Image: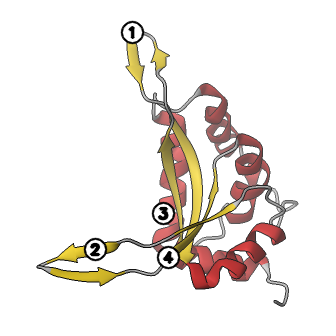
Amino acid sequence: MQEISYEYIRGLVDGEGSFTFCTRPGLLRVGSDTFKPRIPAFILSMNSRDRDLIISVKDKLDLKNRVYTYRSTPLHAFNKSYIRGSKSILIVRDFPSLKNIIIPVFYGKLRGYKGIQFNAWLELIGTDPAVPSLYKLLYKFHKSGFYKKDSYLGG
């Protein structure tokens, strides 16, 4: 497969990616409140026939995360079964990769709804009490202008 560009990755993520949160087992105490920890996550999910493309994205971004492939299960609706294709998924939720790779590649470079989702995700990282304090640094970097420098990946 030929090498892909950062612009291609941004376009692919615009259609197939997500900036979201994953819950973690255990509890997080904030003052007198207790929450299930919510970890910021970047997810790229596509049909398993595009697994090699997801691996190319992972390699271009120099991510150490695995690409998982899940077999499909029938979806039952109105007494009919629909077979969905298997999914290949890249999930990035470790702090160093989010801070040094994911956020810099997409910061200020996504348009439309995905740009809105990305910005709302950064804001929620800073305001959601269920997000562990380490990840709150991502929000602080965002607010301080740290990511506005053009010296990052795909600048």
Image position, residue 150 (x, y; %): 83, 62
Determine whether the residue tagged by mark 1 lies in a helix, strand or loop: loop
Side of 80 where 66 appears, left or right: right
Nearer to us in this view, 142 or 97: 97
The mark that comes first in sequence, 1 or 4, is 1
Circle 3: residue type? Ile
The mark that comes first in sequence, 2 or 1, is 1
Q: What residue would you read off at disc 2?
A: 75
Circle 1: residue type? Ser
Circle 2: residue type? Leu
What residue occupies the far right of the structure in this picture?
Answer: 151
Image position, residue 60 (x, y; %): 82, 71
Rendered image coloring scheme = secondary structure
Nearer to us in this view, 111 or 94: 94
The Cα–Cα distance between marks 3 and 2, rounded to whole angstroms, is: 31 Å
Determine whether the residue tagged by mark 2 lies in a helix, strand or loop: strand
The mark that comes first in sequence, 3 or 4, is 4
Q: What residue would you read off at disc 1?
A: 32
Q: Relative to 80, say whether 105 is above or below.
A: above
Proximity of marks 3 and 2: CB atoms separated by less than 8 Å: no
The crowding category of the residue bearing disc 1, from other C-alpha atoms within 10 Å (few below 14, some 14 to 19, many at least 20), is few
**From the image, which quarter does the N terminus lie in?**
bottom right
Side of 39 where 75 appears, left or right: left
Proximity of marks 1 and 3: CB atoms separated by less than 8 Å: no
